Image (tube, rainbow, N blue to C red):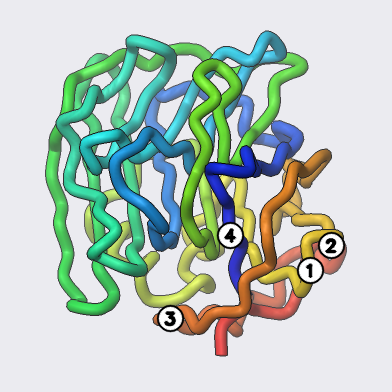
Amino acid sequence: MVRRFTQASSEYIIFGLGSCNIDCDGITIATIAKKVTDGSWQTIITGQTSGALNRFQMQFTDVNTLFMGAANGDDSGSGGIAAALADGWCLYVVSKDTGTVQPRMHKFVYSTKTWTHATQGTAFTNGTAPGVGGSIKIGRNDEFGEYANADVAVVGVWDSFLTDAQVELLAQSIRNWSTLTPTGLWIFNQPDVTTTVKDYTGNGADQTARTGTTANDVVVPFSVRSISNNLRPSVFVPGIGR
């Protein structure tokens, strides 16, 4: 089971900030997803202020590249690595070290088992955190109204810059996501959309609202049945995949 976000229906999920009140001074954002369409700006995740201004964010661009930003105009631009519908299920990762630097971008294509690692796009600053009253949105950013059109299995955020070797562990199992101690982790294995999505880290960035989306029963090309049993019982949900 994964979550389908449909652009035409303006679908997204809102979460509390939990421990994700962070800037881009050493950050990593990852998702396992499959695009449904190309050719438009699509938001995977953004941390937003109480005034709906974007802070840390991960998107697909209208020229089918991966995008990372700290704020509007303080971002990687459209020169990221390719992110195309034809690739099918992929692990996409963007990370930024401290200072005004280019982001490091990563893609693992499950069908071909091929990796792309590249320091790519425009250098940008650390930016600022969403702040008090901010939120996490998966599937939309309010500042520009750019919605995802994709199947999404999992999204994670780390308040640190993951190395290439650490990033490659994420392609192997969800257990590795937990082992690398994310700041926020959302796994879309719910049997229906009425089941609240929890932050698996236990840090409190849990679902607060939802507009649409569909629990899509598809086979994903990786095993995520086994989640570390040391996760807090209040957020433990059986794994997804078959």
Tag 2 and tag 1, C-beta contact below 8 Å = yes
Placement of 218 over or under 59, stated as above or below? below
- Tell which circle, 4 or 1, labels the residue nearer the N-terminal end: 4
C-alpha gap between disc 4 and disc 3: 17 Å
**Which of labels 4 and 2 is toward the front?**
4
Q: Which mark is residue 222?
A: 3
- Toward the viewer: 95 or 229? 95
Tell me the amino acid under the disc marked 2: Thr
Residue 123 as seen in the image, left or right of residue 26 = left
Placement of 217 over or under 235, stated as above or below? below
Tag 4 and tag 1, C-beta contact below 8 Å = no
Q: Dividing the picture into quarters, in which one does residue 73 lie?
A: top left
Q: How many marks?
A: 4
Tell me the amino acid under the disc marked 3: Phe
Query: In this figure, which residue is indicated by the disc labeled 2?
Result: 195
**Residue depicted at x 70% and y 20%:** 134
Q: Secondary structure at mark 1?
A: loop
Q: Which mark is residue 192?
A: 1
Query: In this figure, which residue is indicated by the disc labeled 4?
Result: 4
C-alpha gap between disc 3 and disc 1: 21 Å
